[in-house]
Structure formats: structure tokens, C-alpha cells
Image (tube, rainbow, N blue to C red):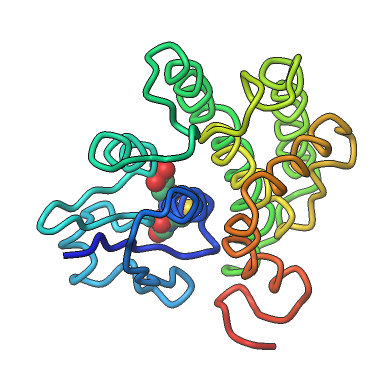
Amino acid sequence: MVLKLYFDFLSQPSRAIYIILKGNNIPFEPVEVLIGQGQHLTEKFAKLNKSKKVPAISDDDFNLSESIAILRYLSRTRQLPTNWYSDDPQAQARIDEYLEWQHLNTRLFCATYFQKAFLFPKLFGKEVPRNRLEALEGNVEKCLGEIERLWLTPGPFINGDHLTAADIWAACEIEQLRMAGFDPTMNHQKLKDWMQRVQKEAAPYYQEAHSKLNQFIKKEIDIFGAKL
Ligand SMILES: N[C@@H](CCC(=O)N[C@@H](CS)C(=O)NCC(=O)O)C(=O)O
């Protein structure tokens, strides 16, 4: 049975896994699980992933969640023709170095900003106090600066000279800020140039994975994915 990917294109790690599958020519059946419509909260989905989050996969009767665990599983069970997750131990360790760092940095600060400054006020109608918003913005700005300093120096990609899964996870997370009206590249020229390189190297899958996010930004769909 073909591998199934449960995903929502408005989810950062869902986009990353989609790009990995497409970019490596791994056959899969895409199954949209729309968070905005509560489809991740059903009993049926909980049987596949008890944490009720996307992305998740089913490979025959093996179900797995957590995007980075999925990436590693794919690299062990499939041919990955790109060198986005090299099987050379040292090259892979360099990719893992960022993937471990990002949990308490890029993911924490960018996703927290997205939720607290944008999503929760939109869903629950409660505005964030100005000083809280400034603190959240400050965390994101500091984190983006650290990405430039720690991971994109000397560049041109994270920890190296070619595109890897580390760049894909980072870029998918940072893109989410744009939904919240935050331009991550405004004060970060190095980050801006790198994002353009990632978009180019992961084309056309990067653009496919971000088309829904871009539709939202262009006000063509709402946060629930409904046409405006
Ligand atoms: N660490 C997980 C994060 C998964 C996650 O937080 N998914 C979010 C979307 S980005 C989700 O499904 N949220 C639904 C909810 O929390 O109710 C991964 O990398 O896969």
C-alpha cells in the first residue's frame, strides 16, 4: 500500500514533509486533514496519531507522527535521491545539529508569535497587549538574527554549501510569520537572500506547499481555508 501523508498546508512541518516526499520522488497519497475544520480532532485521526497533530504518515500499518522522526524514517526506508538528508554520518549530523536546535529556537519563537499575536486573537477575539506583542516580536527578531549568525555564516545554506532538510524546516517555519503580517526579511538581508535560494532550489514543490499560505496572504482564502 502506498504511503499516506496526513497534512495541512497551513502547517509548517506538514509543508516540510511534503517537499521532502515530492523532491525525492517518493510515491504517496496526500490526505488533507484541515486543522481549521477540526479534522485533526476526530477519533478516526486520533487512532493514527494520538497527539492529534499534523503531519503524520501511515506506511502500511505503521503510523508515525513528528516531522523529524518521519524524515529519519523515510531516509531509512526509502531511497532519497537528493542529498537533502545525506546518509554520510558527519554530513547528516550537521543537518541534525540544526534540526535539534530549532525546537527551542525557530519553532518555539516563530510558532509562538504566530499563535499568540495572530491565530488566537483571530480565533478567540482577544487582542494581545502591546508590551506582550513587543516581547514576542523581540524574540522572533533575536532568533532570526541568530539564524543568520550561527547557521548562515558563511552560508550559502544552513551549515553548508547546498540545500538540505535543515533549510527546508527553517524556511517553512519562517514563512508562517508572513501569515501573521510579520515580514521576516525586513531587517535581515542575509536571511532574505537565503530564503530566495531555498525557494529556487526546492522549486516547484516549495511553491506548491506554500500556495495556500500565499492565497491567505493575498486574502483569497480565510484562516479556515474557505474562499473569500
Ligand atoms: N513537533 C511536531 C509539531 C506538530 C504540530 O504542532 N502540528 C500542528 C500544526 S503545525 C498541529 O497539528 N496543531 C493542531 C493542534 O495543536 O490542535 C512536528 O514537527 O511534526
Instruction: List the single residue furthest toward the top.
Output: 90
User: Which image quadrant for residue 69?
Assistant: top left
- Quadrant (top left/top right/bottom left/bottom right) for the N terminus: bottom left
The image shows residue 124, relative to residue 203, as above or below, that is: below
The image shows residue 222, relative to residue 131, as above or below, that is: below
Write the residue at 44% across / 48% down.
24
Q: Nearer the viewer, residue 202 or 180?
A: 202
The image shows residue 73, relative to residue 206, as above or below, that is: above
Residue 53 location in percent, x, y? 35, 56
Residue 182 placement, left or right of 42 = right
Residue 111 location in percent, x, y? 58, 45
Residue 136 location in percent, x, y? 71, 38
Q: Nearer the viewer, residue 216 or 115?
A: 216
Residue 86 placement, left or right of 186 = left
Q: Nearer the viewer, residue 38 or 155?
A: 155
- Quadrant (top left/top right/bottom left/bottom right) for the C terminus: bottom right
The image shows residue 172, relative to residue 30, as above or below, that is: above
Residue 179 location in percent, x, y? 70, 60
Q: For the image shown, how many numbered marks are present on the structure?
A: 0
Write the residue at 37% across / 68% down.
30
